[in-house]
Each structure stands twice: as structure tokens, then as C-alpha cells.
Image (cartoon, grey):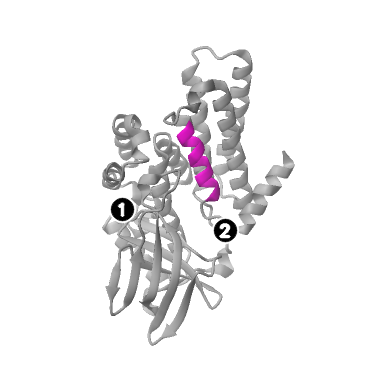
């Protein structure tokens, strides 16, 4: 079944997405249509284990999926990453019954969920009230408004990392208020409807919350999806160079071979769980940046055109670099700079 889905997916991406990849970054309606087509292909079920109703993608297949989708569209990959991140967190909570029930519900309904983690930012205050908590504060940006019906909120209460599903919509009720801003004006993935969300006395029942197993998994044990996205971006950039030159000049060919070898080594390293995700993410970022420099220099002045695909991928790399940003990740980036 997975092979059949991959075949249909490849055909769809090549025929529908590839010709409109630049437009897809800017046109919300088109993105909404294409992303929901991915949902129909059951791509979101790959991340959920079989025992919960998913298709149980192997690690090698996960890499293949990321490389396939992001070959044609970074914004589609980014939306899928939101869903994957949420599923990863749900898989690592203490309340196994709650996690099992929620994952089965997501799988049965083929339901995409957004993602918002503010674990390292004290932007929401939770106050105990009766059978739950009242939330006040804000999240500066959450991606996928009008694409995801709900998002997974990950935040701290009394030093513990808590998770709960929140409706991704404006709410004004006895349970408090959620206010969604207009889409934030960003330089990449404009069509993804990234917004600010304000919480005003918003009430969540304790029974609707889950607790992340910090003692077992640690704050940074979950590999950020951008570890895979960097590899995809690097691959696309090298592909542009290869396709644009029927016969590569000797120096360009040498540079291409060198970077292709580094990319293959990086992908090989992804086949097993990463011991230090922060360092590996930094490694992926600088590999993608090297490929970006190589592509722009090899392809020359045409890459200055605003609609050139290399420009779009360069912006995507920067977005991947700061997604889920943290002080420890910054240190890993700087350490990598110091090694160069």
C-alpha cells in the first residue's frame, strides 16, 4: 500500500505541484487545495504507528518521503512537518491511554494537526481554576490557519511540559477567548497563513491535557523535521546545477561531486536515530548553505531574478534554520561557524 501511495504521490507532485511551485508559496487557496490532496493520499498516516491506525513509515521511508515532497515544494514539506512534530510529541507522553486514543482519532479521521511550542518562552501564564487551567498570553506565530482545524499547544505549567489540542480559530465563549491575527507578512511561505494567537482567560480541562515525559526523553531528544528538510534543499540545489549545464565545467563538476558526496554522507547518517540532534541540524544547515552558494555562483546572474527557484530555496533554508529556534540551537550553529 505504501508503494502505491508513493507512486501516486510522485505523479501528482510532478504534474500538479512542480509547474506551480513558485505560485504555491504565495497563493493560499492553491496551497490549501494541494495540501488537502496530500491528505487524501494518506501521507499524514505515515507518521503514526500501525498499532494506532497509521501506516507506520520506516525511518528510511520517512527520508524518502521528505526528499520526494520537498523536491517539488518547501511549503508543503513545512506544513507536513507541523503535523509530524505534533505526532512525535504525542508519542512521547506519560499518559499512554490518552496518547493512544488521540492518535487513533487522528488516524481514523485522517486529520492534520498544527504545532505550537512555547516551552522555552514564558509567553502564556496558566492559572489553576477548578478542574483545569485558565490560559492568558500569546503565541507569536503559528502556521496553517484555515489549513489545520486544531493545533497541538506545548507549554510549561509549574516546570512540567504539558500538551493539549486547541481549536485553530477565533473563539469567544464562556470558556474564554482565542483571537487570531491577520497573517504575518513573512518573506517565505507567505501562503501558509502564519498568525499570532492571543489567549484571554481561555479555559482547558485538566483531563484534556497530557504530560511530556521529560525524564525519559529530555527537552531536545525529538529530532526537528528540518534535519531532513536541509537535505532536501541541498539536493534540489544540486539538481538545478546539474540540469542547467549539459556538460559541467571541470571545476563546477569537482564542486558538484564534492557536495554530492557530503550530502550522501549526511543522508546515510540520518538512517539511524541521531545522538545529538542539535549538532546534526547545524551540520545540515551549513551543508544546505554551501549548496546554496554553489548553485548561485554556478548558475550566475539569472539567480538574481526574483522568481528564480534558487531564490525560493535560499529563503526556505533560512526559514528551516530558525524554525523552533532555541538558545542551545544557536550555540550549535555558532560552534559550527567556528569550525569552518
Q: Position of residue 152 (x, y in %)?
A: 40, 63
Q: Position of residue 84 (x, y in %)?
A: 42, 53
Q: Which residues are magenta?
A: 311-322
User: Residue 257 falls in which quadrant of the image?
Assistant: top right
From what the image shows, is residue 115 above or below residue 163? above
For the residue pair 95 and 11, the one nearer the viewer reads as 11
From what the image shows, is residue 83 above or below residue 202? above
Closer mark to the observer between disc 2 and disc 1 = 1
- At label 2, counting other C-alpha atoms closer than 10 Å, the crowd grade (few under 14, some 14-19, many 20 or more) is some
Residue 14 marker: none
Q: Quadrant of the N terminus?
A: top left
Q: Quadrant of the C terminus?
A: top right
Precedes in sequence: disc 2 or disc 1: 1
Q: State left or right for residue 324 relative to residue 18.
A: right
User: Residue 198 falls in which quadrant of the image?
Assistant: bottom left
Q: State left or right for residue 97 relative to residue 269.
A: left
Disc 1: which residue: 147
Which SS type dominates the magenta stretch?
helix
Disc 2: which residue: 221
Residue sitting at x 36%, y 51%? 193
Q: State left or right for residue 149 relative to residue 271.
A: left
Amino acid at each position: 500500500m505504501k508503494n502505491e501511495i508513493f507512486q501516486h504521490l510522485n505523479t501528482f507532485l510532478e504534474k500538479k505541484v512542480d509547474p506551480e511551485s513558485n505560485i504555491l508559496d504565495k497563493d493560499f487557496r492553491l496551497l490549501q487545495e494541494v495540501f488537502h490532496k496530500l491528505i487524501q493520499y494518506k501521507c499524514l498516516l505515515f507518521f503514526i504507528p500501525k498499532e494506532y491506525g497509521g501506516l507506520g513509515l520506516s525511518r528510511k521511508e520517512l527520508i524518502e518521503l521528505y526528499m520526494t515532497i520537498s523536491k517539488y515544494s518547501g511549503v508543503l514539506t513545512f506544513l507536513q512537518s507541523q503535523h509530524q512534530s505534533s505526532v512525535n510529541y504525542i508519542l512521547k507522553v506519560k499518559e499512554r491511554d490518552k496518547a493512544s486514543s488521540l492518535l487513533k482519532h487522528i488516524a481514523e479521521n485522517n486529520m492534520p494537526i498544527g504545532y505550537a511550542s512555547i516551552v522555552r518562552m514564558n509567553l502564556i501564564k496558566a492559572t489553576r481554576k477548578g478542574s483545569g487551567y485558565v490560559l492568558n498570553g500569546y503565541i507569536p506565530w503559528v502556521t496553517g490557519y484555515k489549513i489545520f482545524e486544531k493545533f497541538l499547544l506545548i507549554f510549561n505549567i509549574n516546570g512540567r511540559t504539558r500538551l493539549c489540542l486547541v481549536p485553530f480559530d477565533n473563539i469567544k465563549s464562556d470558556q474564554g477567548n482565542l483571537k487570531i491575527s491577520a497573517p504575518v507578512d513573512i518573506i517565505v511561505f507567505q501562503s501558509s497563513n502564519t498568525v499570532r494567537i492571543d489567549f484571554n482567560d481561555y479555559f482547558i480541562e485538566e483531563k484534556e491535557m497530557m504530560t511530556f515525559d521529560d525524564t525519559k526523553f529530555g527537552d531536545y531528544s525529538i529530532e526537528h523535521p528540518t534535519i531532513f528538510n536541509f537535505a532536501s534543499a541541498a539536493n534540489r540545489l544540486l539538481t538545478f546545477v546539474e540540469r542547467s549545464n549539459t556538460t559541467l565545467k571541470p571545476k563546477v563538476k569537482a564542486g558538484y561531486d564534492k557536495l554530492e558526496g557530503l550530502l550522501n554522507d549526511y543522508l546515510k547518517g540520518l538512517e539511524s536515530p541521531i545522538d545529538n540532534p542539535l549538532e546534526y541540524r547545524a551540520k545540515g544547515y551549513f551543508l544546505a548553505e554551501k549548496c546554496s552558494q554553489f548553485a548561485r555562483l554556478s548558475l550566475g546572474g539569472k539567480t538574481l531574478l526574483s522568481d528564480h527557484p534558487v531564490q525560493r530555496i535560499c529563503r526556505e533554508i533560512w526559514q528551516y534554520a530558525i524554525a523552533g529556534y532555541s538558545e542551545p540551537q544557536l550555540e550549535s550553529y555558532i560552534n559550527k561557524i567556528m569550525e569552518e
